[in-house]
Amino acid sequence: MDNERIDQIIDKHQCEASSLIQVLLEIQSENHWLPKEALERVSEKLQVPLTRIRHIATFYKAFSLVPKGRHEIHICMGTACHVRGATRVLDTVQDLTGIKPGETDLELKFSLETVNCLGCCALGPVMEIGGKTHGKMAPAKTADVLKNYE
Amino acid sequence: MSEILLQIDGKEVGATEGMTLLEAARKVGISIPTLCHHEKLEPYGGCRLCTVEVESRGWTKLVVACVYPVEKNLVVRTRSEKVDRIRKMILELLLAHAPDAFALQDLAKEYGADKDRFEKEASFCIHCGLCVRYCAEVKKKNAVGFVDRGTRREISFIPEIAAKECWNCKECFPLCPTEALQAAFVLTKALFSPPHPGPEPRG
Ligand code: SF4
Ligand code: FES
Ligand code: FES
């Protein structure tokens, strides 16, 4: 992500320090992570100390300070999904992608996270990829779904 | 400014509006232990060690003296049985993180806190925020800040700023109630300065 695009996002928020989180969220969603240079740019333009930005960027799970894959997989480990076999879904995904929760593969294809309830327990076990919800997952079905992602 | 009269440990104390209980107590020589308070910094209320019991209109409650503003006719007890019990517990929890901190050991003696009560989890920093706030509020350099949250929260220097500012300042070092701050700085320095620092004065 270049400085020009970052400046555009910042200008959209009138360079207001109070829009810090909004600005970071937009960079995160476009770029999938927050590079150090981007944070420095934001710090300079919004006049917010870098210490504060880093505190916020490490506080919320929505932000990542390391590169993320093109597709972010969220596997629900909430109670309802758990009793319906979320662990087996997670195991399958780990085997197929070779990464554990919190990790990203070397080709930057997938990132894996676990979450606790996505709010659609009736569909459990639930796996979400890039915002799209896949319900009633079973190991074989999980493999089929993953094949569709490049 | 009008004078506000209140009672602290049985003593009549006059204070002005906007003062905290801690300031009012110190003015008349009543000491309340603190870990995260510093006169030059905004009240923070992070450590809760300065907890006192206040009574107004028949109700008693526990408040932190370093942020609670004085009120007319307030009755304050700085050393009740309840207060002492709470301070003992806070100290025991903090000692699990920084068992060797002298400031904590001294207080532990006074409050009968057992430093081995909780399993050690030596992270050394007790999150008082003195270093972080001093750097931001007094020095306005923001070289050190907190990162992460909950049990993983820790202080972290911004190497680029630290390399420029910290060597000649280090005013935060003596503020730290534990040795965590110095350790973090030494680490940052070791990681980010070249093996033979050029113009840096060697102590
Ligand atoms: S490093 Fe020391 S001064 Fe800084 S927050 Fe931790 S305990 Fe407080
Ligand atoms: S527990 Fe998985 S969606 Fe609620
Ligand atoms: S001194 Fe009051 S909360 Fe720390």
Image (tube, grey):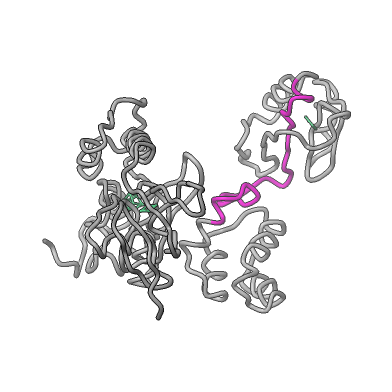
Between B22 and B130, which is closer to the camera in this rendering? B22
Image quarter of residue B201: bottom left
Between B129 and A106, which is closer to the camera in this rendering? B129
Q: Against A31, is A150 above or below?
A: above
Q: Against A138, is B65 above or below?
A: below
Residue A114 place in picture, x, y as percent: 68, 34
Residue B87 place in picture, x, y as percent: 35, 40
Q: Quadrant of the N terminus of chain A?
A: bottom right
Image quarter of residue B144: bottom left
Q: Residue at x 30, y 69 (%)?
A: B165
Q: With A122 as the anchor, is B89 left or right in this view?
A: left
Between A4 and B2, which is closer to the camera in this rendering? B2
Residue B115 place in picture, x, y as percent: 28, 30
Total numbered badges shown on the rendered structure: 0
Q: Quadrant of the C terminus of chain A?
A: top right
Q: Against A11, is B183 above or below?
A: above
Q: Residue at x 23, y 55 (%)?
A: B195
Query: Magenta segment, which residues?
Result: A56-82
**Does residue B111 belong to the magenta stretch?**
no
**Does residue A68 belong to the magenta stretch?**
yes
